Amino acid sequence: MLKDNFGRDITYLRLAVTDRCNLRCTYCMPAEGILFAPRKEILSYEELSRLCSIYSDLGIRKIRITGGEPFLRRDLMTFLKEISERNYFDKISVTTNGTLTRPFLPELADLGIHDFNLSLDSINKERFERITRRNCFDEVMSCLSELTNQPFRIKINAVMMAGVNDDDFIPLTLLALDKKIDVRFIEEMPFNGTGKTAELIWTEVTMENKLRSFYPNMIQMPMEPGSTSRNFVIPGFKGTVGLIAAYTRSFCGTCNRIRLTPSGEMKTCLYAQKGMNLKEMLRSGHTDDEIKIAIQSSIQERYRNGWEAERDRGVEVSESMATIGG
């Protein structure tokens, strides 16, 4: 099993299959988009499958498929079927914006995909379109409806932004009222592709206080090691509500995850400027054992937390979350 230099077990891989996205969410990238990686710089499915085998051998037990928007990548289902049938991992999860996902849901259920994270920052159509800069609200809500008819565990990810979607906080919370949906509110991060950091008003503390003003009897659940969210049970709700301190980073101490970017860079911390180039190793003839040794070595140089990683960057955060794996 992978263990970092602080004694933390590394069991969770976030694998981004593409940096491309069909939305232009204000907190992720500018309206004109970003400079996407050339196709030849993106890891092939053969390379991704090989790395999945390597990571499985090293003790990674959970994988989350992300992007960009993963369903923009052609033949994604073939890749998911392969890693599912080969039993590389105990759990396969998917994060999506829901614009293209609905037709694949029955097949994904048959493959044994365990849970879905659906990005949804507003349930008001006009606000949704202002945030995403696209007219896809109906498709996303249709995807959410179909998700509830399938056996997945469903998580809603909502980034809270002052002056943008404040009025959605309680309506989004109510999605967990009569369905087994876990609604998770996320602090806004600086990974917006512009180099500009928004003033953080909706902190984890602010969000908890707001929730308690409406639901004073809500109960915090025990926080599992490696969890990024503090989760709450509200009496009468079928689902749960979670708060993710993505910017204030209060959860870093038990972090159990690593990231693989679409271009093959392994990052041991979201806020780290650089990672290890696995694509170069794959394409220059290194053996699986050599790649395993390199991964283990990189894990031994991990930052204690996101604050250390950010201080060590030397430059301001300016990249889009789509290039890292949202």
Image (spheres, rainbow, N blue to C red):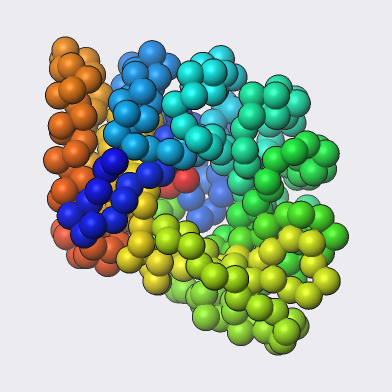
Q: At x 59% / y 71%, what residue is drawn?
A: 221
Whether residue 305 is visible: yes
The foreground one among 47 and 35 is 47
Count of numbered marks: 0
Residue 182 vertical placement versus 138 (above, below): below
Question: Which part of the image, by quadrant, shows the N terminus?
Answer: top left
Whether residue 316 is visible: no
Q: Position of residue 78 (x, y in %)?
A: 56, 15
Identify the image quadrant of residue 103.
Answer: top right
Q: Position of residue 176 (x, y in %)?
A: 76, 61
Identify the image quadrant of residue 298.
Answer: top left
Q: Residue furthest front?
A: 1
Q: Position of residue 195 (x, y in %)?
A: 34, 56
Q: At x 36% / y 52%, what residue is drawn?
A: 256
The answer to whether 52 appears left or right of 126 in the picture is left
The answer to whether 28 appears left or right of 283 in the picture is right
Q: Position of residue 310 (x, y in %)?
A: 25, 61
The foreground one among 308 and 321 is 308
Q: At x 46% / y 68%, what residue is drawn?
A: 245
Residue 126 vertical placement versus 137 (above, below): below
Residue 289 vertical placement versus 219 (above, below): above
The foreground one among 201 and 150 is 150
Q: At x 69% / y 71%, what residue is drawn?
A: 233
The answer to whether 295 appears left or right of 92 in the picture is left
